[in-house]
Image: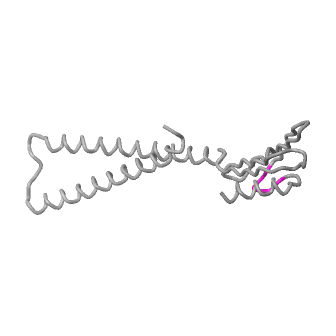
């Protein structure tokens, strides 16, 4: 299952578990009210107690699953902050002697807006690659206009 599907699946399972717990609680209250109105006592064979014990086990299982899903969701939230989730790219031509926009500035940021701006300057004789660190959406060194635009795209997108 893709990582981007884990959070929605975990949230969905958590909602289902919570709704199930609410339904069991409402049904237990209705059963208590019905028992009081009709005057029916627990049957002497203990079948009702067995059913209640089984329901209690189901509630315990759902509660444990809900806790597990909550823990997994916290872990996924933490991991998503560190993953590259925002990208900006600008292609350009810095030199008159080359054709096409072969040079580029690529911004790769995580959920905290930390990451890098990778730049490649392509000419007929050579290609140079530069990397600049980004902390909280700000560069540690001066950015070219193209690098700044790639960073703006990543932060905005």
- In this picture, is 33 found above or below 100? below
Judge by depth and name the residue closer to the eye, 140 or 69.
140
Residue name at image x 89 percent, y 36 percent = 126
**What secondary structure prevails in the magenta region?**
strand
Horizontal relation, residue 30 to residue 115: left or right: left
In the picture, measured across the screen, residue 130 lies left or right of residue 34, that is: right
Percent across and percent down for residue 85 are 64, 48
Residue 108: percent from left, percent from top: 72, 47
Residue closest to the eye, 61 or 129: 129
Q: By what rule are the colours in the image chosen?
A: one colour
Seen from the viewer's position, the closer of residues 57 and 44 is 57
Q: Residue at x 19, y 40 (%)?
A: 50
Total numbered circles: 0
Residue depicted at x 68% and y 60%: 156
What x and y, as percent, mark residue 44?
Answer: 8, 43
Residue 115 placement (x, y as % from top left): 75, 47
48 is within the stretch colored magenta: no
- Quadrant into which the C terminus falls: bottom right
Nearer to us in this view, 62 or 130: 130
**Residue 64 position by quadrant:** top left
Residue drawn where x is 81% and y is 54% of the image: 146
Q: Is residue 74 left or right of residue 57?
A: right
Magenta segment? 134-139
């Amino acid at each position: 299952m893709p990582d981007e599907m884990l959070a929605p699946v975990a949230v969905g399972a958590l909602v289902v578990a919570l709704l199930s717990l609410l339904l069991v609680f409402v049904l237990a209250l209705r059963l208590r009210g019905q028992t009081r109105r009709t005057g029916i006592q627990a049957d002497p064979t203990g079948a009702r107690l067995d059913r209640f014990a089984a329901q209690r086990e189901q509630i315990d299982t759902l509660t444990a699953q809900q806790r597990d899903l909550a823990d997994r969701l916290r872990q996924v939230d933490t991991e998503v902050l560190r993953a590259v989730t925002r990208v900006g790219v600008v292609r350009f031509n810095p030199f008159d002697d080359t054709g096409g926009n072969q040079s580029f500035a690529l911004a790769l940021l995580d959920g905290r807006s930390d990451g890098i701006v990778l730049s490649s300057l392509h000419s007929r004789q050579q290609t140079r690659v530069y990397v600049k660190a980004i902390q909280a959406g700000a560069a540690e060194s001066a950015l070219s206009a193209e690098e700044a635009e790639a960073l703006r795209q990543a932060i905005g997108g």
